[in-house]
Amino acid sequence: MPNFIDPTPPGHCLFCRLIAGEIPATRVYEDDITLAFMDLGQVNPGHVLVAVKRHAATLLDLTPDEAAAAMRMAQKIARAAKDTFDPPGITLLQANGKEGEQTVFHFHLHVVPRHAGDGITFTWPRKDPSRETLEAHAARLRAAMAD
């Protein structure tokens, strides 16, 4: 199955340039696979982006090791944000493809400390499918994972 289209021209990826040190970033932590840095569009103090160092446009372009490393880093950052800023909640956000609201086509996820009334909302229209429909969808997914 094809991955999402990466509209970034080769050599023009903002995050690749940031990771390479060609443009400045406020780095928080890094390891061999990932880099965590402050989001310039801070929603709340401690809002950090976790990106894989290798250019991979979406989650579907990651290796299993890269996906695991990104989640390990996100957890490490979330714990540090909780200890440092004491938010009552934390949201992880990761988007894929234009229709998924992805704006930078280099895999990353947001670790966002959350507070009541911080202006972040997540809403979508509930479709409430029947149990039979859900079972049919689940069966299709199980079949795809068995391949």
Image (spheres, rainbow, N blue to C red):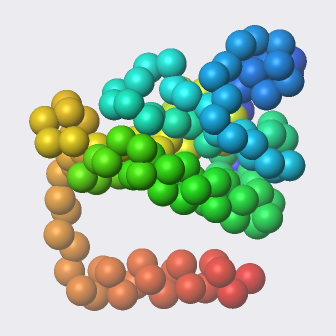
The answer to which of 74 and 142 lies nearer the viewer is 74
Residue at screen point 65% across, 81% down:
145
Horizontal side, residue 140 vs residue 32: left or right: left
The answer to which of 83 and 130 lies nearer the viewer is 83
Location of residue 4 in the rendering, given as x and y in whole percent from the top left corner: 65, 43
Q: Is residue 80 visible?
A: yes
User: If the image is split into quadrants, where does the C terminus sit?
Assistant: bottom right
> In the rendered view, would you say 125 is above or below 57?
below
The answer to which of 89 and 120 lies nearer the viewer is 89
Horizontal side, residue 78 vs residue 85: left or right: right
Residue at screen point 55% across, 44% down:
109
> In the rendered view, would you say 93 is above or below 105?
below
How many marks on residues?
A: 0
Location of residue 97 in the rendering, given as x and y in whole percent from the top left corner: 56, 39
User: If the image is split into quadrants, where does the N terminus sit?
Assistant: bottom right
Q: Is residue 1 visible?
A: no
Location of residue 29 in the rendering, given as x and y in whole percent from the top left corner: 69, 41
